[in-house]
Image (cartoon, rainbow, N blue to C red):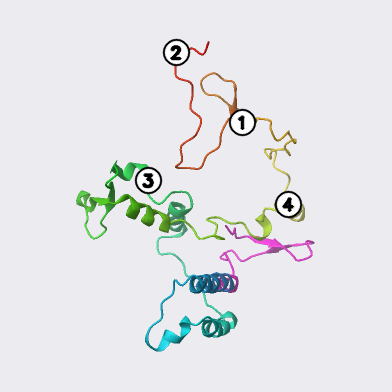
Amino acid sequence: MIVPGGGLSLDGARWVAARTDFLVHINVLGRLFRGKMLAMLMQAHRAGQLKFFNTHAGLADKRTFKRFIGPLRHIKWVVYCKAPFAGPRQVLRYLSRYTHRVAISNRRLVAADDGAIAFRWKDYRINGPARWKTMRLHPHEFIRRFLIHVLPKGFHRIRHYGLFAGINRADNIATARALLGVAQPAGDPQKPQESPADAPRVLPCPCPHCGARMIVIETFARGCEPSWRPTPAGFDSS
């Protein structure tokens, strides 16, 4: 995620302020998308996923396709940017559906068995409550459609560049604050002390039921089930 406002100079000695209406340089976006797109085309060609017909049938040959792709690496790609119709708040709402949500939420799932998976979907051609309909798909087809929303290898939903890059983020922020004359916030967390690798992680917030410290016993991805299960109540292990 790129945050507007400015950045450090190349030598790190001064702060370079950006225009108030500046977000990201379109030339940088053009080069980024050009590299990603051409790399994915080459990978798809090697995997035999591209089909060519008529006058383009010769591109099926590996060397011919490379000669065709070569000049595209030096062409300037233009990324068209314009102000959103409903303002930046609507853009953030749209992007948040893809950066912080899965392809389909649990509340849209109606039923599931070995034969089919039923889920609700919205028909935008219809207005009113009737736009919500139910679709049934074979589990294999449902999984295929779900995996379409998984990002390809090398892509990240949110990536920090420049000033907020993970490696030099702390040093860059400290330098920027010093150049801008901004005091260190009082609420900034201190550098955590190193602990043994096998030591349990302790959360800073207490348990809402007993007030004791909460210790992480397992970490699992969103949508997955934990492998650990609590001992049933009344179980006698003696």
Identity of the amino acid at label 2?
Gly
Q: Earlier in the sequence, mark 1 or mark 4?
A: 4
Q: Left of 38 or right of it: where is 175?
A: right
Where residue 105 is drawn, which disc sits there?
Answer: 3
Q: Earlier in the sequence, mark 3 or mark 2?
A: 3
Q: In this rendering, which labeled residue sits more in front, label 4 or label 2?
A: 2
Q: Earlier in the sequence, mark 4 or mark 2?
A: 4
**Residue 174 showing in the rendered view:** yes
Q: Residue at x 44, y 71 (%)?
A: 49
Identity of the amino acid at label 4?
Arg
Identity of the amino acid at label 3?
Ser
Give the magenta range: 1-30
Q: Residue furthest left?
A: 130
- Circle 2 sits in a helix, a strand or a loop, which is it? loop
Q: Residue at x 60, y 60 (%)?
A: 4
Q: Is residue 63 above or below residue 41?
A: below
- Circle 4 sits in a helix, a strand or a loop, which is it? helix
**Residue 75 showing in the rendered view:** no
